[in-house]
Amino acid sequence: MSKEKTRVKQTKPRGTYPPSLKRELAVRYLAGEFSYAVAAEDFGLPSAETAKEFVRWYKRLVASEDAD
């Protein structure tokens, strides 16, 4: 059995997206403007999962601001 190395395509290093982009995507997604897949395509992200993570990030941010 041969061992093959699997390459992981990474278009941007983790954590390099500006908060303003994350916030805009999340607000528009939560307003029902588009799905995760469409958001990823519109914002030039590598996957719908990245868009989903931005929405999670935004929800945590809003929750922490509300707690203050």
Image (cartoon, grey):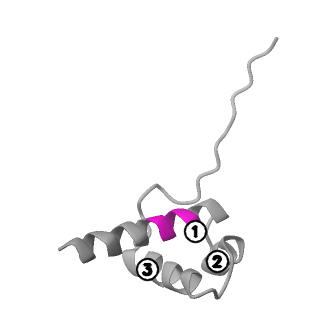
Can you name the residue that lies furthest to the left here? 68
Dot 2 or dot 3: first in sequence order is 3
Residue 6's place in the image compared with 64, above or below, is above
- Any mark on residue 31, and which? none
Vertical placement of 32 versus 5: above or below? below
Which residue occupies 38% across, 75% down?
Answer: 19
Give the SS element for disc 1.
Answer: helix
Label 3 sits on a secondary structure element that is helix
Name the quarter where the C terminus is drawn: bottom left
Instruction: Locate residue 3, reporting x and y percent.
Output: 74, 18
For disc 3, the marked residue is: 23
Q: Position of residue 46 (x, y in %)?
A: 64, 63
Residue 51: mark: 1
Q: Which span is picked out in magenta?
A: 52-56
Q: Earlier in the sequence, mark 1 or mark 3?
A: 3
Cα distance in 3D space between marks 2 and 1: 6 Å
Number of on-image labels: 3
The quarter of the displayed image where residue 48 is located: bottom right
The amino acid sitting under disc 1 is Ala
CB-based contact (under 8 Å), mark 2 and mark 1: yes
* Disc 2, SS: helix
Give yes or no for residue 24 being in the magenta stretch. no
Whether residue 53 is in magenta: the answer is yes
Q: Residue furthest front?
A: 67
Q: Residue at x 69, y 34 (%)?
A: 6
Q: Residues within 10 Å of mark 3 (few under 14, many from 20)?
A: some
Q: Which residue is disc 2 drawn over?
A: 39
| Crowding at mark 2 (Cα within 10 Å: few <14, some 14-19, many 20+) | many
